[in-house]
Amino acid sequence: MLLRNRLERFGLIAVAFHWATGLLFFGLVGVGFTMTRLDPTHPQMFPLFQLHKSLGITMFLLVLMRLAWRGVNVTPLLPQGMLRLEKFAAHATHWALYAGLVLMPLSGWVIVSASPFGIPTIFFGFIELPHLSFVIDSSDREAIGKAASFFHWAAAWTLIGLVMLHAAAALRHHLWLQDNVLKSMWFTRDLFKKERVE
């Protein structure tokens, strides 16, 4: 199996990280929007809130692992025909996505830490995550919570826009330009072929 990246395509681990991140993102968005539409006294609010926080923690850890894996692998080359501005936009979008996917869970952690209700964060019902002491002890706790909530909301919509842009660019490469960009991040047969030892 092709586990590591090559200059012509991403390896199986990077591909798995990519699509797991995408699925988790849409799960987070779905649960988040459902939460905001429910009455706070709805019996499903607490389980949904805990699920949203658990998924957010998972996203945070997943993106950190993905960045670590990226750091020890080569990054496949973009098509030679791409303009310099297009390459810059592609790289900028990727790093903006990474930044958002790291900062959103952190802002969520600040929100729950600033909440006056003191509701614990229990990771999938097993591990309790402590609140941030610097937020709890701050005299500006309420203001910090409001700022973090605004950032969380704004970042969510920004990330949705970036994901749509990312998907549109991938489809443009695949359907219009007909290059290898989307295929290099897909579960194609060559990923599962036994590698020859030279």
Image: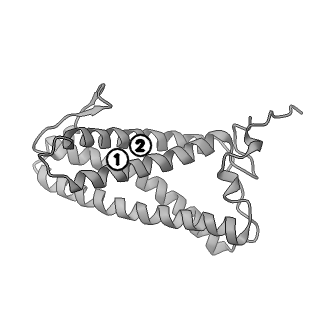
Residue at 70%, 55% (x, y): give it.
183
Q: Which mark is residue 87?
A: none
Q: Which of 106 and 17 lies nearest the eye of the viewer?
A: 17
Q: Quadrant of the N terminus?
A: top right
- Residue type at numbered disc 2: Phe
Which residue in the protein does label 2 denote?
A: 60
- Callout 2: few (<14), some (14-19), or many (20+) C-alpha neighbours within 10 Å? many
In-front residue for pair 97/176: 176
Three-letter residue code for mark 1: Pro
| Viewer-side residue, 121 vs 27 | 27
Side of 70 relative to 125 (left or right): right
Residue 105 drawn at (x, y percent): 34, 47
Q: Residue at x 24, y 32 (%)?
A: 130
Image coordinates for residue 191, horizontal then vertical, percent: 73, 41
Which secondary structure lies at badge 2? Answer: helix
**Res. 104 in view:** no
Q: Which of 80/46 is in front?
A: 46
Relative placement, left or right, of 37 versus 56 is: left
Q: Quadrant of residue 193?
A: top right
View extreme (top): residue? 126
Question: Mark 1 touching mark 2, by CB under 8 A?
Answer: yes
Q: Which residue is mark 1?
A: 105
Relative height, residue 145 to residue 150 (above, below): above
Let me know if residue 94 appears in the view: yes
In the figure, 11 relative to 143: above or below? above
Lower sequence index among marks 1 and 2: 2
Left/right of residue 84 with respect to residue 148 in the rendered view: right
Q: Is residue 22 above or below residue 154?
A: above
| Extreme-front residue of the structure | 43
Mark 1–mark 2 Cα distance, whole angstroms, equals 6 Å
In percent of width and height, residue 64 lies at 48, 42
Residue at 26% x, 42% y: name it. 48
